[in-house]
Amino acid sequence: MSFGDIAGLWLATGLTLFLFSFLYRDNPFYKLGEHLYLGVTIGYMLVKLVYETWIPKVWNAENYALVIPPVIIGFLLLTRFVPKVSWLSRWSFAFIIGYGSGLAIPATFTSIILKQAEATTRPLVTVPTAAEQKALEAAEKTLADTRAARGNEAPETRAAEKAALSARRSGTYSWVRAYADVTTIILFLGVFSVLFYFFFSIEHKGPVRIFSRVGVLFLMIYFGASYGYTVMGRFALLYDRLLDVRKASGGDAWFATPIILVLMIGVLVWRHRTGKASEEPSH
Amino acid sequence: MRALALLLLLQAPLWAQLPEGFEVYDTPGDEGSSALAVWKALPKETADASYVVWRAPAKDGPWEEVARFPQTAGWKSDAPQHFGTGSGNKGWHWASIPALAEPGKPPVAMWVKLGVEGAGGAAESAPAEVTPVPNWWAWNKLNVFLFVVAFTCVTFWLISRARRDPNLFIRRIPGLDAMEEAIGRATEMGKPILYLNGLNAMDSISTIASTCILGQVAKRVAAYDTTISVPCFDPVVMGVSQEVMREGFIAAGRPDSYRSDAAFFVTSDQFGYVAAVDGIMIREKPAACFYLGYYYAESLLLAETGATTGAIQIAGTDSVTQLPFFIATCDYTLIGEELYAASAYLSREPIQLGSLIAQDWGKLFLLAMILLGTVVGSAAVVFRAPALLFLKDLFATYS
Amino acid sequence: MRELFEKLLKMDRRWIFLLVGIALMVPILKPLKLPGLKASTPVQDLYTYIEGLPEGSKVLISFDFDPASKPELEPMGAAIVRHCMRKKLKVVAMTLWVTGASLAQRVVESEATAAGAKYGEDYVYLGWKPGNVAVITGMREDIHVVFPKDSKQTDLSKIPMMQDIRRLRDFDLAFSFAAGSPGLDTWIAYGADKEKVKMGGGSTAVNVPSMAVFVQSGQLVGFIGALRGAAEYELLMNFSGTATRGMDGIALGSYLVAALIILANIGYWLTRKPKGVA
């Protein structure tokens, strides 16, 4: 590892441990880490904006006449800092909201509402089509012929059996089809009952109430799944950090993890002893 | 004889049959980036033979291949966005030809020709001229346009109705009863109520809804003579909270009980805010905690601490990712739109009320369409009448 | 029994933090190679779709995440780039997240270098441009206007593989690996659906339930859900990367949380005060 790599590992590990120290209680290491994170992000964004937008799109613009109006609209946003003329920023907001909703409403309506409605609009029951039934007859015939010609154990017979089995699944009302139908029905029930739950202009009484309770059940299943996924996601993040902490604990990283840990614990114990830590709220 | 055979072989390409009805025209409803070519299927088509489409800037070339596919593919019925779902599409092929003009540059004419290549030889049609131009109207988005216009009209109409009659019916959200119960319990126990507005600024709908509800809560608090504290994350939200609470106290006839320091600014640092509010909860042990508004990762930290103090907890947020955490830790949670509905129910503010009912209309329309589509679709399958499936295309085709 | 559960329910939560830390650290120190990983249908579909693309097909990959979501999304991004390189597809990479610009570059360059791909002919990295939705709508019109230069400041018009890639619709497949918004749903609504471009993608675990609807509706050809999805993809690709190695720890952590939830529920029922008694 080069010196630069080692310095990077020390920095990454140090900041990780600083932020993890919040699990014990709020402390200056955590605050330092948090503020550094915010500062670095904002600095990075500023540099990127200047070099990726301001210089190529505004400063070196091909046609200044096209650039000036948006730049003026952008600058009007800054009038919010001057209370007397802050009303000017409304012009910018009017532009942003007008442009944004003009762009968003049709796109969202098409991709989110119409497409999803289309996917929900499915036949609740499916029956084999004429073509599928024909394919089943053909497959059964091939199987019988192959069996007669090659016997029961030949690989060709096995292949024909497999083909006949899959043809049977689509050519008859099989469990595969039943499973798909049940899924469709559950989906349909879910969409309907949840939307019913969010109806505000009718009283939820009698059957409507029962139906909207079903909607709540669907919502709870969704939230349960979401909760589980969130936990899993957080573990993935923790795993990655622990991996780095482990990587930095060896001799090739100059024992970054143990050294930083010992120093941190030392300072925290010292602060605890001198009573400085009691000013911070704990968990 | 050999010479004749050779001559026949050389002539062979001319024997391949060309399709009828070859036509090229500008793609309707686009920005001028392509043209469409259509032609009738040959009486006998095989997967080994292909259709080829070329384009060129002039009638005599140079020709560039832009599409090639087997004769058994490229059907008009595969592209309802261009040709709809009518039965006239049957037995017709199509191809899209990219325009020669660079994007944003003036339209340029081009020549297009169709070829057939296969075991039987090859043949080419006569070139046809076309100029792809940008169009004013995208007809395939007509359904979106109509829906947006209709929905806007309905919304405006319902808002104006709500202005004239603020008592338009919306159902009472059960969470509101829970709130009232919580305020009552706080009064009995002689302990304060903690009310949080979320972490978003005043431009967020959930914060607006939250402050509207705060006004009504303040009215009850004033009537019962309970104490309330509202730690704020945003200074502007603090100002608005103070104002709505003052109005609530006045409406309840207790302007003397109002204290402006009931709503106070804490910090705009996410976890600093959490630490401070958690501290308040542990020290003051409120009888009820309300978390209404938009929350981020702090939701669980707040609600969990509140739960350990034994307070009745009521949450309401449209932050979908945080809802599971509130549901797990609170006694009652207003889910998503219920937060807006609760606010409209309590405040009777015409814009909130009107748009809430308009959304119900939108949902009803959508449900009716899905129901109709599902019933007809199921009937089509059970009775083997595929013609009924056209309804499904209402969503698909023109979007 | 009841006292034990009462104690457990009031346990300092820092003990749980410690347990979770141990559960995740053990497999790092000693890999367990837990069995049972199997590709789910959406992951398999994505794999099959890429397998079916002919050599030289054009693929757009947008790395829409920041360092905070890197552990969840980088492995799947790397697996897809690796798959594209293996299939000799032309890859155009970019990002809509400013803080993801260097992350994306690192993933693409390391996978491309490992596969021996040539910059400008087999892959290009366009970098970041501000505007979110405006970038996507701009790319529908002309990519060369939105990104006049690539991340190395070379004119797009001078890059060989960009000659016949002018618009979004020129791609045979587009991807977004998204940690939030702008992300997968933005690409679907403003890009893929409008231009009828096939779209695949992946998201962080938090967003999996809300993205799953796009798989069901067919707006995505396939979908990779978080680190687990990435591990499934690595399985299909027949290599063991960060995601596969991470599965042990995540499995142990998940078992621990599940056990704690069950325990806490039993505790709740046992320690619950009978009704009517205050």
Image (cartoon, coloured by chain):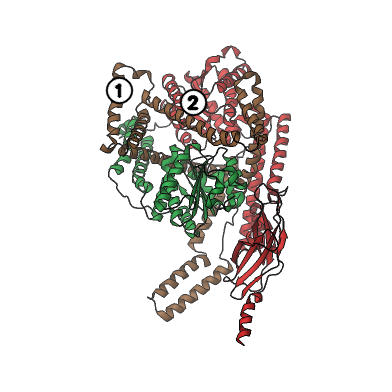
Chain colours: A brown, B red, C green
Residue sitting nearer the eye, B56 or C209 = B56
Badge 1 density bin: few <14, some 14–19, many ≥20, Cα 10 Å = some
**Mark 2 belongs to which amino acid?**
Cys
C160 versus A85 height, above or below = below
Q: Nearer the viewer, residue A137 or C168?
A: C168
Packing grade of label 2 (10 A; few <14, some 14-19, many >=20) is many
Q: Nearer the viewer, mark 2 or mark 1?
A: 1
Q: Residue at x 53, y 54 (%)?
A: C58
- Mark pair 2, 1: CA separation: 37 Å
Q: Does residue C227 appear in this view? A: yes
Name the subunit of mark 1. Answer: A
Question: Given the image, what chain letter belongs to the residue carrying mark 2?
Answer: B
Q: Of all residues shown, which one is farthest toward the top?
A: B256
Provide residue B72's location: percent of width, then percent of height.
Answer: 60, 68
Quarter of the image where the N terminus of chain C is located: top left
**Most distant residue in the left direction:** A251
Residue C84: x and y in percent read 46, 54
Residue in the picture at 59% in, 49% down: C167
To which residue does mark 1 refer?
Answer: A267
Across and down, in percent, residue C105 comes to 45, 43
Element at label 1 = helix
Q: Nearer the viewer, residue A103 or A238?
A: A103
Instruction: Inspect the image, locate mark 1, and give the three-letter code of the amino acid beneath it.
Output: Val
Q: Label for residue A135?
A: none
Quadrant holding the C terminus of chain C: top left
**Extreme residue toward the bottom, this view:** B1
Q: Is residue B321 left or right of residue A153?
A: right
Taking depth in this image into account, of C25 and A43 the one nearest to the observer is A43
Question: Left or right: where does residue B325 sit relative to residue A192?
Answer: left
> Which residue position is annotated with label 2?
B289
